[in-house]
Image: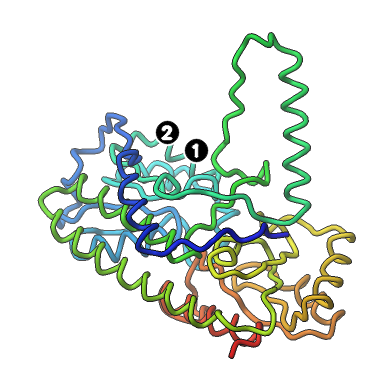
Amino acid sequence: MSRRRRPRISPARTLAAGAAALGVLTLTACGSDSGTAGDGGADGALEVTASFYPMEFLAERIGGEHVSVTTLTKPGVEPHDLDLSPKETARLTEADVIVYLKGLQPAVDEAIAQSGVQHIVEATSFTSLEAHGTDEDHAHDDEHADDDEHADNDHDHDHDHDHADDGHGHDHGAEDPHIWLDPVKYAEVAQGVGTALAEADPDNAADYEANTEALIAELTTLDEEFTAGLADTETRTFITTHAAFGYLAERYGLHEEAIAGIDPESEPSAARLRELHEVAEQDNVSTVFFETLASDATARTLADDLGLKTGVLDPLEGITDRSAGADYLEVMRANLAALRDALGAS
């Protein structure tokens, strides 16, 4: 289940903290042989490679006319499952800047680590991460923690053991990578990406700064719309296909119950399905949400069993012709409308 929501922090306060934290900006110098940063492609544009749609959106909006953006995850491809061909991996080395989110796509993480690109911008370094998901995710995490403890006992206790967090990985069911579904956290990432592009291409730094400020203003407005739109509802609980909306739920005082965990490919147990039956009855849930890029079979089966409606809540991992909008902002507003309907907002 989702954790209890912490007191809500205002967008202005959070964005100020995010800007102050830019001293730890992840701009990794790896001695690339692919050219001097800012040289760009044949048309002079800065060549930016984004790992998947939320990173692509930031790069395009902030980079504007000064960048040429390609994405590793094609429309309609579930990003968690992405594998890169040798050709795609080789092409990655030609980028001036890479913008990605660690922990969501293991194949991408590995390819980027080996790319030798000079400017690598990692989204989660600009904001804080939290643990979300189902009880089964956390039980899996606890099992790994027990294994680590036993492994420590087999070593010299004078030795410092660093069980490094491996980047929000799904194997541990720990930190949730879906930060872009919280407009405030996404704005923190936008600030970081803007600073990174300015450092990679200082001649156009003023434009990157202006574009960043404009996008943050739009994201702040979006946050205000969610706050007002979800302030008064008949229920605060919603059911989703997989646990992608933990940050959104925390931000707006909602309670997400997911069929699967952080990883959309994980299968719910019979006990989990029974638990969802109880939650739906106790919390007056009206709708089971499914997604555009993942299978809707389990969600529809659960809804049929409970006599509930189904709806689409888009985790915005990609834009296709089935998306309820042409870009991040439009789809997020469609998500807000879907949540208001399902939660009985007034």
Name the quadrant containing residue 2. bottom right
Q: Is residue 164 above or below residue 193?
A: above
Q: Is residue 312 left or right of residue 272?
A: left
Residue named by callout 1 = 110
Decide if residue 246 is on the left or right side of residue 128: right
Q: Residue furthest left?
A: 203
Q: Secondary structure at mark 1?
A: helix
Task: Verify CB contact (< 8 Å) between mark 1 and mark 2.
Answer: yes
- Quadrant of the rendered image containing residue 206: bottom left
Q: Residue 114: give its label.
A: 2
Farthest residue toward the bottom? 346
Q: Position of residue 323 (x, y in %)?
A: 51, 78
Please, is residue 6 above or below residue 131 in the view? Answer: below
Residue at the extreme front of the image, as rendered = 7
Q: Residue at x 49, y 45 (%)?
A: 102
The residue lying toward the viewer, choosing from 34 and 283, is 283
Between 95 and 201, the residue placed more toward the observer is 201
Q: Which mark is residue 203?
A: none
State how the image is colored: rainbow
Q: Secondary structure at mark 2?
A: loop
Q: Quadrant of residue 87?
A: top left
